[in-house]
Amino acid sequence: MEKGLVSVITPMYKGAAFVGEAIESVLKQTYTNWEMIIVDDCSPDDGAGITEAKKYTTDLRVILIESKVNLGSSGARNIALRKSKGEYIAFLDSDDIWYPDFLEKQLEFMKRQDAALVFSSYRRIDELTKKEILIPFIVPTKVTYKSLLKTCPIFPSTAVYDTTKCGKPLFNEAMGSLRDDYVYWLTMLKRIKQAYGNGEVLVDYRMRKTSVTANKKKVIVPQWKVLRQIEKLSLWYCVYNIVCWGFISYFKYRK
């Protein structure tokens, strides 16, 4: 572990169109003590994403790993986590964009709150035009394990955590690429009790039409499985939390 170093974890799957912008947003950070570990998850794109990412590896802080097996975002993130050396872990999906002061402001916020895990508000943009398509999502000031059962305001590309307080847990690879980040935050919130939300918008989230989480109807069953099978909640408590999740999600994604 290198004190002050931020390890940026970036899983990539068919990321050629957008990964360059994601990498450039890290290169432009005002906080410069970082390493970016990009893991191509055996993308079926004839190496297009790898070729794009390699353009930036002349900066030795940018590390590219080519997985020969498709593991889903959970497995790709685990490869990067095992490789990481940072005191802090940050996540940036290969199609999202950090504002230049993202790391600086999140680390300052973390210090000010004496927090183990912080996350920020974010803007929601069209994948191609980058036009804002929904109002910015403004996060709550705090979340706990119990509140996370109802809804998850922690978007991976906005999150930073301190490994000296959280450890460096791995993702549940059985989740593949669906609800894996949600299970990760639930696991972490059992350790640290609460995480802190920064109300400032610091990230552009590219809302892709092909995203597995874009259609909430398809996520209901995995959401139920997380609550019932992973968290082992009682039947009626699962029903209660699913109803809360559906209600909150409606307003979260309403135009």
Image (cartoon, rainbow, N blue to C red):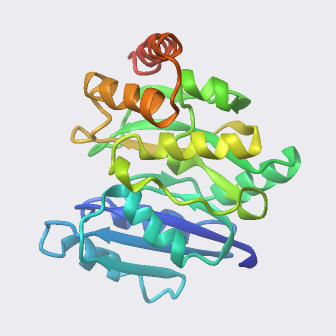
In the image, 146 versus 205, the foreground residue is 146
Name the residue: 44% across, 27% down.
228
In the image, 232 versus 198, the foreground residue is 232
Note whether residue 202 is visible: no
Quadrant of the snapshot with the N terminus: bottom right
Name the residue: 76% across, 51% down.
116
In this rendering, would 38 be left or right of 166? left
Figure disc tally:
0
Position of residue 13 measured from the top left corner of the image (x, y, whole percent): 27, 61
Position of residue 104 measured from the top left corner of the image (x, y, whole percent): 72, 59
Name the residue: 72% across, 40% down.
195
Position of residue 168 measured from the top left corner of the image (x, y, whole percent): 63, 63
In this rendering, would 102 be left or right of 193? left
In the image, 85 versus 130, the foreground residue is 85
Position of residue 76 measured from the top left corner of the image (x, y, whole percent): 38, 65
In this rendering, would 58 be left or right of 154? left
Quadrant of the snapshot with the C terminus: top left
Above or below residue 62? Residue 173 is above
Note whether residue 180 is visible: yes
Above or below residue 169? Residue 129 is above
Above or below residue 235? Residue 25 is below
